Image: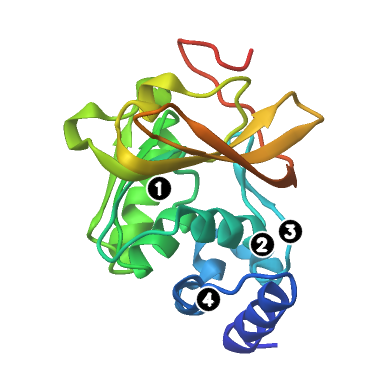
Amino acid sequence: MTPDSARERMIDLLQQRGIGDERVLRAMSRVPRHEFVDHRLQTEAYSDNPLPIGQGQTISQPYIVALMSQALALAARGRVLELGTGSGYQAAVLAEMGAEVHSVERNEMLASAARRRLVGLGYTGVSVLCGDGNDGCAEAAPYDGVLVTAAVQEVPRGPYYQLRNGGCMVFPIGDEDNQELVKVFRRDSGPREEYLGSCRFVKLIGRHGWVK
């Protein structure tokens, strides 16, 4: 099966699982996911599974990437903060949706590889920073949306307060074996939460130790 036909099958599966945002589906039909995994795993790139990317990290399964991207409900040219660049795939999907993406990755090897990969594929509008994302990235705030791609145990307050009023943050919360994907809106009256379903992510680590 060619990458193009495998990608088409992936899009069909996403639609069957309830992903209806045309911008998300269009973006994921354009991003070559096989370029974001090791060449030995390229035949599995469009299966609906997470895959290892080295350094103890994974690229999320396509359904979770689609669900989180859809949950952001971004307006055209929205500004997004991503905590946990990983391979850069999620950032590429957001960029294809028209977002201005600021992504923070604490692992220098992953950050450098993702930066090179994104530039090589033409995603020059994605900024990849190497550092501890626990405090977010105040320099480019406020954001229309924040995505956290590793599990936390409480709402990440630093990035939350870098949202514009009305913006939202999507993140997995829970312990190692029991996590929920949550969407939190920032409102003057206080945060409002929506639960999007169960999930499984690697732990977020950093100096503030949300997950230890």
Check disc 4 and report the residue beneath it. Answer: 25
Labels 2 and 1: the sequence-earlier one:
2
Taking the image as shown, residue 1 lies to the left or right of residue 103, namely right
Q: Where is residue 23 in the image (x, y as percent from the top left)?
A: 44, 74
For residue 149, which quarter of the picture?
top right
Which image quarter is the C terminus in?
top right
In the displayed structure image, the side of residue 55 where residue 122 appears, left or right: left
Is label 4 in contact with label 3 (beta carbons under 8 Å)? no
Cα separation, mark 2 vs mark 4, equals: 11 Å
Give the Cα distance between marks 3 and 1: 21 Å
Q: Residue type at mark 2: give it.
A: Tyr
> Which residue corresponds to the image point at 41% horizontal and 54% vertical from the top-left?
91
Q: Mark 3 sits on what residue?
A: 49
Which circle's residue, 2 or 4, is located before the other in the chain? 4
Q: Earlier in the sequence, mark 1 or mark 4?
A: 4
Closer to the eye: label 3 or 1: 3
Q: Which residue matches tag 2?
A: 63
Secondary-structure class at tag 3: loop
Mark 2–mark 1 distance (CA, rounded to whole Å) = 24 Å
The image quadrant that residue 174 belongs to is top right
Residue 38 appears anywhere in the view: no
- Residue denoted by label 1: 113
Write the residue at 45% across / 30% down: 107
User: Compared with residue 11, is residue 132 higher up or lower down, i.e. above or below?
Assistant: above
Label 4 secondary element:
helix
**The N terminus sits in image quarter:** bottom right
For marks 1 and 4, give the CA distance. 25 Å
Mark 4 or 3, nearer chain start: 4
